[in-house]
Amino acid sequence: QMIFAATGVTEGALMRGVRFFGEGVRTSSVIMTLNTGKVRFIESIHLDKKPDVKVRFA
């Protein structure tokens, strides 16, 4: 089994770079798995460690 994983740091054709917002950071990643032939794009939000952070999904 072979897996490739990457997270964008700067803007590119395949993924967006790290984006900072008031309460945290947003990252884009890609995971490719050879044996299943799947490509997954993952959008993650990393929140600051504040107890009263509010998240709004658009």
Image: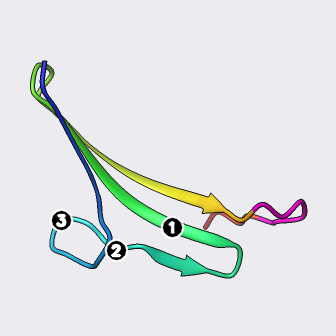
**Quadrant hosting residue 55:** bottom right
Count residues near mark 1 (Cα–Cα under 10 Å), then give few for <14, some for 14-19, many for 20+: some
Q: How many marks?
A: 3
**Quadrant hosting residue 11:** bottom left
The secondary element bearing badge 2 is classed as loop
Q: Which residue is mark 3?
A: 14
Which residue is at 78% across, 60% downward?
49
Does the magenta-highlighted stretch encompass residue 51? yes
Q: Amino acid at mark 3?
A: Leu
Count residues near mark 2 (Cα–Cα under 10 Å), then give few for <14, some for 14-19, many for 20+: some
Residue 4 sits above or below residue 46 on the image:
above
Where residue 24 sits in the image (x, y, percent)?
64, 70
Which mark, residue 13?
none
Which mark, residue 17?
2
Residue 44 sits above or below residue 13 on the image:
above
Does the magenta-highlighted stretch encompass residue 37? no
The C terminus sits in image quarter: bottom right
The N terminus sits in image quarter: top left
Q: Nearer the viewer, residue 38 or 48?
A: 48
Where residue 39 sits in the image (x, y, percent)?
20, 40
**Most common secondary structure along the magenta stretch:** loop
Q: Amino acid at mark 1?
A: Arg
What is the distance, in whole Å, between disc 2 and disc 3 at their CAs?
10 Å
Q: Which residues are magenta?
A: 49-54
Which residue is at 50% across, 55% downward?
44
For marks 3 and 1, the one nearer the N-term is 3
The secondary element bearing badge 1 is classed as strand
Direction from residue 27 to residue 5 in the image, left or right: left
The secondary element bearing badge 3 is classed as loop
Direction from residue 41 to residue 44 in the image, left or right: right
Q: Which residue is mark 1?
A: 26
What is the distance, in whole Å, between disc 2 and disc 1 at their CAs?
9 Å
